[in-house]
Image: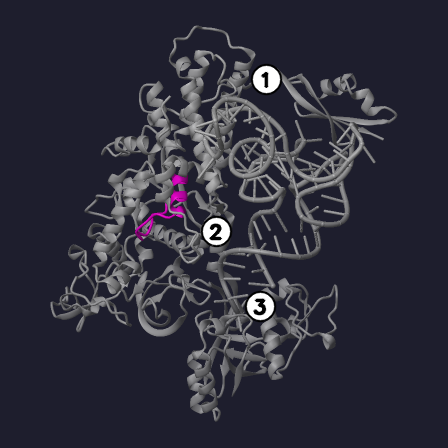
Amino acid sequence: MEKYNPQEIEKKWQQVWNAPDYYRTTEDSSRPKYYALEMFPYPSGNLHMGHVRNYSIGDVVARYRMMAGYNVLHPMGFDAFGMPAENAAIAHGVKPGDWTFANIKNMTAQQKAMGLAYDWDREVETCREDYYRWTQWLFELFYKRGLAYKKAASVNWCDTCGTVLANEQVIDGKCWRCDSEVHKKNLAQWFFKITDYADELLADLDKLTGWPNRVKVMQENWIGRSEGLEFFFEVPALNEKISVYTTRPDTSFGITFLALAPEHPLVEKICAISPKSAEIKKFCERARSQSDIERTSSESEKEGIFTGVTCVNPFNGGSVQIWVTNYVVFEYGTGAVMGVPTHDERDWMFATKYGLNKVWVIDNPNAPLDFAKMDNAYVEKVGVLINSGKFTGMDFDAGFKAIMDEAEAQGFGKRKVNYRLRDWLISRQRYWGAPIPVIYCDKCGEVLVPEEDLPVLLPDDVEFKQGALSPLSTSKKFNECTCPKCGGHAHRETDTMDTFICSSWYYMRYTDPHNDKMPFARDKVNYWSPVDQYIGGIEHAILHLLYSRFFTKVLRDAKLLDYDEPFANLLTQGMVIKDGAKMSKSLGNVVSPEEIIGKYGADTARLFILFAAPVERDLDWSDEGVQGSYRFLNRVWRILNIFSDAIKSPDAAQALTAEEISLRRTLHKTIKKVTEDVRDRFAFNTAISALMELVNAMHAFQDKKINPALARELAKDLLLMLAPFVPHISAELWSKFFDGDVHKQSWPTFDATAIVEEEIEIVLQINGKVRDHVKIPVGLNKNDLEKLAPTLPRFDELTAGKKIIKVIAVPNKLINIVVK
RNA sequence: GCGGAUGUGGCGGAAUUGGCAGACGCGCCGGACUUAGGAUCCGUUGCCUUCGGGCGUGAGGGUUCGACCCCCUCCAUCCGCACCA
């Protein structure tokens, strides 16, 4: 018997699969479609185990669906713009494009060495002209729809990366990529108006029944919708109005101060008339110099300064002090907040620190509050309004509504919905991205580059120095241009787009990757979409997955496609960890996929990674475990070789022995389980364990003669079930015994009659404790079982001297006798 | 603080609808084959035991004939958001 030699057979089959048409997919209305997609990688240079896990999962899904009769789209590509390429240019003087394409070449070779079933003809690389041309085209579409705008704003700036960042890319006040502190800068930047879609992005989360709840909750929190009242206070000294937003209008009679963000425009006006202006300015400067972390952490000290100016509470005419504070966020709501110390935790702390008034306006009738002894705010939305003029006596709900009605009737306020979500800052002061296709004309101002002039190509005469300006601004030939409108002197926008824009529509491009008239044809994107199964890491729960949902809705409104959500089902795989920590170079616990594949083969690597943990959980890397998977493949190889003669010999139409019937039952039970595990649950770990049990059962026949028909059936179905998991060994063994290509066969179906057992072992319990196992005919009903109970061998012994209270029978499971 | 998850042998994990806890794999131990074994095959392996059985799924309570599973109260770990008014 020849040895299992993965290196040899994997190379052989990969060559077969590499044929141009092997995995080519086209639209086909005769079969149901299935779009299986793994998040495309950044071409960092090498695959890591996270990639291997991602693609192994996706490949099982895709290959299973192919065998199950679906027309499967399973593409791969590269998220190829981004900083590392540019950093390589700065550090080593290589061109970002050269660096990127060399990495893509290397990683593609590694992906092919995994034996993945991709239609490589559809490969997408976001840094190629034929792709970013359409990224720019889409930017212009957004612009024309009023969803792209340039605005001066206080934005997040990372010194290390030399660029601005979107809110979603700031994690704990730090850059998502390089972990260095982010600070605020005032810059004119391009934004996408994602807030226009906030309501729909939130509401449609309900449609995403195939998404993990965790991800939906994260997006819900990120969007952060709240309902309340926006109303204004008169500021007599300035003859001005100042608006606040509140979610607790019911507490409006308890307002004792008003807090402004240091950035609020009213602060400057106050300084113009206030004798304390020097002090106020100093305070604002100090607050603004604090980092985002210091300013926005709930543990930070709340500080403020009284401006000396007051305003009027429109509900009761009361005079309210205006303070400037460090804890009010300028970008949210109106940048000004009403202060109700008695019914808000923060306001309580602030008022206590500065000795401000506290007026109780809500009491809890079920457990009346002892106001004199209260040492914190009462924030429950339960109770009755007090000290609230004509609203006194109303309960929370009634008061909440009545006070908003009053504000609207009197014309000083309006019901308002607010979101935590901010517009998406998309410009980057970097080179290796899609240039923003805008021209600034001295006469005409901001002008889009005409569609026929796209793409705006990246120039190569640039200097890769970091600073507040994009490297594009160092290119003469890029910068200077003529206005497409008036032909006069103009210059180009030198910022590029956030790479998350490129990745917000790549899955649409896969459906029509060679289209040179449009980003994609409507009928093609509609045929394949939505993605039936999207697979990737949880780290994109907000960023990529929210942006992509936004893009889909905009393109739907622009009539480019006809569905609401891009990803019907989402699978968030766990991380690959080793020795209790994520694999990382600094910890030295990295296991290289290349090494594992070189040593054991891709099939072993795939098998281990699918077997070692459920897909959603973190996976503990174990070198011994890998050997176990290798051992299993050897066992498969061996047993089929042992069965070889039987498989190849003609059927003798012999009846099966009892043992063979039982083995055949195991086979069909396994088909049932593996099918359900793979199709319904992504429970690859248990599917594989069932296959191991089947192979173990086959090994019991290694020294016996086996019925040829059964041997053939076992070999066939086992290889068919193994094919999605370990494609190479399955193809090799199939070719030894059977005609055709295992990967072009149909998924096996189980024979229901083969599964039926005549006898079944049930449990005899006394008071819920297992006392005996008995074999009985299958299919006895409750009544039969209850009658059977007293006749069981150990019944008398187990119930001796006890009183039988009742007998509980569960067909095919157990009999429980309750005694006293 | 708010929100979401997770907690089962020495380890990774299984138990899909409230019905035999620990499938499968790793490791350990024993046996076979062998000049040899770090190959392979077969077997044992939750803990305690007076061998009848007792205990056991983070802790404590509850519902039930019966709970890893449902309910309540905690604890621990991980993740997300975090002064959003």
What is the chain letter for disc 1? A
Q: Which percent across, then down, holds residue A148? A: 31, 62
> What residue type is disc 3 on?
Arg
Helix, strand or loop under label 2: helix
Of the pair A550 and B55, the residue shown nearer to us: B55
Q: Mark 1 points at which residue?
A: A757
What is the chain letter for disc 3? A
Q: Which percent across, then down, holds residue A176? A: 40, 61
Q: What residue is at 36 percent from the left and 36 percent from the top?
A: A601
Tell me the mark number nearer the camera, choosing from 1 and 3.
1
> What residue type is disc 1 on?
Glu
Horizontally, is A406 left or right of A83 in the view? Answer: right
Of the pair A485 and A610, the residue shown nearer to us: A610
Residue A714 seen in this snapshot: yes
Cα distance between the residues tagged 1 and 2: 43 Å
Of the pair A795 and A257, the residue shown nearer to us: A795
Tell me the mark number nearer the camera, choosing from 1 and 2.
1
Task: Kindly indicate the quadrant of the structure image that contains residue B46.
Answer: top right
Mark 2 closeness class: few <14, some 14–19, many ≥20 residues within 10 Å: some
Is circle 1 on the same chain as circle 2? yes
Q: Mark 3 points at which residue?
A: A248
Q: Which percent across, then down, holds residue A755? A: 54, 19
Q: Name the residue under label 2.
A: A215
Mark 3 closeness class: few <14, some 14–19, many ≥20 residues within 10 Å: many
Q: Which residue lies furthest to the right in this view?
A: A801
Q: What stretch is highlighted in magenta?
A: A38-58
**Residue A55 lies within the magenta run:** yes
Helix, strand or loop under label 3: loop
